[in-house]
Amino acid sequence: MLHRLIAAIGAALIVGCAALPASPTPAHAPLPDATTVTVRRTCATTLHADVQLSDEARAVIDHAGAAWRGPTQGRLNVGVVYDLDFSSPINLQAHEAAKDSLLIPIGSDSEIAARLDAEFAPGRPLAVTIKTDDDRTIVYLIMDRIDEVHALDVVTHEFGHVCGLPDLPMTGAVMSGVSIKGAPPPDGFQPEDMALLRAAHYLD
Ligand SMILES: [Zn+2]
């Protein structure tokens, strides 16, 4: 029995030795191919908008939110609820306490518009998106400067800012920062818009 065991061990050793590769085994076995990790970003923001906004304005705003979902496969998602009531201090305090992001329509003769004009001089902005110190987003729409033809593009552009996209220097794209009065609205998302989305990791 012992002999047979020794013989078996011997055979195993011999087999083992015979199986050794001719070249020395590298000290570190090569790692398997690394798994490719793709960082994809999503933006889901809810803006609380003025209850006074008309049905027409709401339709444009909702359409602007939906416009980003297709090209980003739902990764850029700005939703709007119409529950901001400026006539109610309690409502305003509740939004303030909840640190809500807001969508606020203003007139060009308002104090806020004057401040935005000074900030964005020499241009007269149609709409402005700001980030507050406590990381809330506030979108101001200067209603009497936005005409019907451009309304959807203006709001769509601001929603791009809500999700952190910067302005493009050229005209004709959704994220073009330059707005030329009377210019035709962009014909949907342009390659430059898609490049911005890729750079911001919303798209591969
Ligand atoms: Zn802009």
Image (spheres, grey):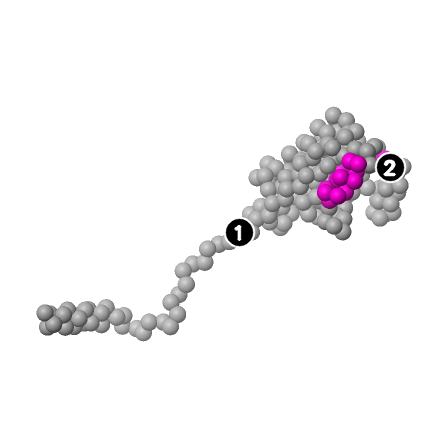
The picture places residue 184, in percent across and down from the top left corner, at 74, 34
Region rendered in magenta:
90-107
In the rendered image, is residue 7 in sight? no
Occupied quadrant, residue 156:
top right
Find residue 108 and name its label. 2
Among the two numbered marks 2 and 1 on one chain, the one whose residue lies closer to the N terminus = 1
Label 2: which secondary element: loop
Quadrant of the snapshot with the N terminus: bottom left
Q: In this view, does 32 lie to the left or right of 195?
A: left
Three-letter code, disc 2: Ser
The stretch drawn in magenta includes residue 15 = no
Which residue is painted at 76% across and 46% down in the image?
130
Label 1: which secondary element: loop
Compared to 11, does 186 lie above or below? above
Which residue is painted at 72% across and 49% down in the image?
135
Ligand 1 within 8 Å of disc 2? The answer is no
Find residue 38 and name its label. 1
Gap between marks 2 and 1, in whole Å?
Answer: 44 Å
The picture places residue 45, in percent across and down from the top left corner, at 67, 41
Q: Is residue 18 left or right of residue 154?
A: left
Three-letter code, disc 1: Thr
The picture places residue 33, in percent across and down from the top left corner, at 43, 58
Compared to 141, does 6 lie above or below? below
The picture places residue 56, in percent across and down from the top left corner, at 74, 26
Which residue is painted at 79% across and 33% down in the image?
85
Q: In this view, does 164 lie to the left or right of 6?
A: right
Mark 2 nearby-residue class (10 Å; few <14, some 14–19, many ≥20): some
**Nearer-the-camera pick, 200 or 94:** 94
Which residue is painted at 60% across and 45% down in the image?
42
The stretch drawn in magenta includes residue 102 = yes
